[in-house]
Image: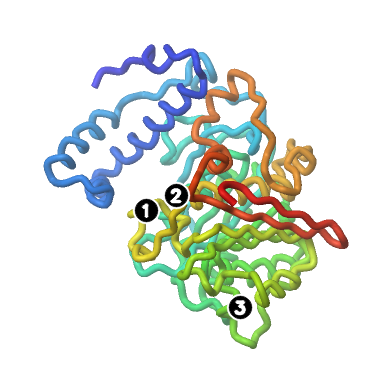
Amino acid sequence: MDENPEALRGADDARAQADVLELLRLARGLARRPDRAGAVLQELGFESDGRAGMERILGALRDVRAPVTGVVHPGESPQWQPSVLAPVFYGHADHGTADGLPGPVRVFYPSVDGSPQDAQMLTGVGRYPVVLFLHGQCAEPEHYLKWDLVPMQLARSGYVVIVPKLSSTPPFGGGADADFDVATSALTWLRTQWEHRAELMPRPMTGVVGHSWGALLGGAVAEHLQAQGSISAFASLSGGWMEWPPNPPRPLDLDFATLFAWGTGQSDLFAQLSGPAAAILAQPRGAVHHVAFRDGEHFDYFREGSTTCGRAFRGPCSLMRPLAADFVTTFLSHYMPPQRWSALATLIPHSLVPPPLDLTPQQEFFAGGHLTGFAAIPTARTCSVTHGWHLPPFLRGSIVLGAG
């Protein structure tokens, strides 16, 4: 396939150029993994003939360069630190036992490179907070790699996110759980051995995000980090807090900002913190945000067909995945911003709905596909999300987005 940079540069709309470039980046990443491309295309519904044709297209895209000339020259850094209000691209790299870890992890980070896999990290524009992301239980190979949008968007917004592979054993033992050691070891490795550790903000600028049992494990990790003065925020995505046994106590004695999200669909019953279960929201002592997706199901955080888990339960709203990523990103941006973006505590309101992006032409180039949930919810007929917050001692508020 002939390279035609002018085709990418010809559009006057920088955001359109960014969308095209993002499509190229995703296609090139898939093309570089031919062993997985066939399975992915089969999940998307391509039959053998159609799949062969699509694989030829992906093969042709493998070597297409995605230029950023005229916006940022190759090897040149932009003159701003990325944030939720001024995103860049993202990169990711895989590490494991050969690097001194107890098991596989994937690390996401800000980048301006045209292809995510092993992209060059964006450095020299300010230091980044750290986020530990913990996946939930799902009996499929490499489930930790299925979580993409949340860590991708956080990386684009100025965060370094580490996603370890967990055994998905029940997390009710707190610090005695095997995955607890995996999670805390991943954080220690990132801050002490990772090649880019000098680009990270100090230990208190650490957040923990988890889904399902990963959220429950995340609570135990969060309490552990709190005892060390090493955490600023925690987010639970459909954590099954109603599953937690009487002993030991739920690990929610937290004195920093927390966010709890869940769907009201039948497969997310143990995560719904409404009615009598809302008492759980009073356990954390810091700012508490709670986000309820109407009719959302436990695995609606994934694109349909991308995981073998939860296929029998899909809610009517296709925006739960991007909305969850948007809320987590703006939540962390408000309470745990990148080094040079302390103003985000004011610019991002308590509703966590950000103001419209006000970008330079350079910044516009990188903004394609960013905060798509917030952008789409005003006109979504089958989607409704309610967000409430309590900021001690007295400040409370709530909003409804979508077809309330």
Q: Which of marks 3 and 1 is in front?
A: 1
- What amino acid type should be assigned to the residue bearing mark 2? Ser
Q: Is mark 3 on a helix, strand or loop?
A: helix
Find residue 25 and report its horizontal and vertical position in percent: 39, 33
Question: Image check: 101 left or right of 241?
Answer: left
Q: Quadrant of the N terminus?
A: top left
Separation of residues labelled 3 and 2 (CA atoms)? 34 Å
Q: Is mark 2 on a helix, strand or loop?
A: loop
Q: Residue 118 carries which label?
A: none
Q: Label 3 belongs to which residue? A: 174
State the residue in front, 28 or 213: 213
Q: Residue 318 carries which label?
A: 2
Q: Label 1 belongs to which residue? A: 304
| 2 and 1 marks in contact (CB < 8 Å) | yes
Q: What element carries label 1?
A: loop
Find residue 331 and report its horizontal and vertical position in percent: 67, 50
State the residue in front, 82 or 41: 41
- What amino acid type should be assigned to the residue bearing mark 1? Glu
Earlier sequence position, callout 3 versus callout 2: 3
Residue found 51% across the figure and 14% down from its top: 70
Separation of residues labelled 3 and 1 (CA atoms)? 32 Å
Find residue 192 and report its horizontal and vertical position in percent: 62, 54
Above or below: residue 159 compared with residue 306: above
Quadrant of res 257: bottom right
**Residue 187 in view here:** no
State the residue in front, 80 or 333: 333
Q: Which of marks 3 and 2 is in front?
A: 2
- What amino acid type should be assigned to the residue bearing mark 3? Gly
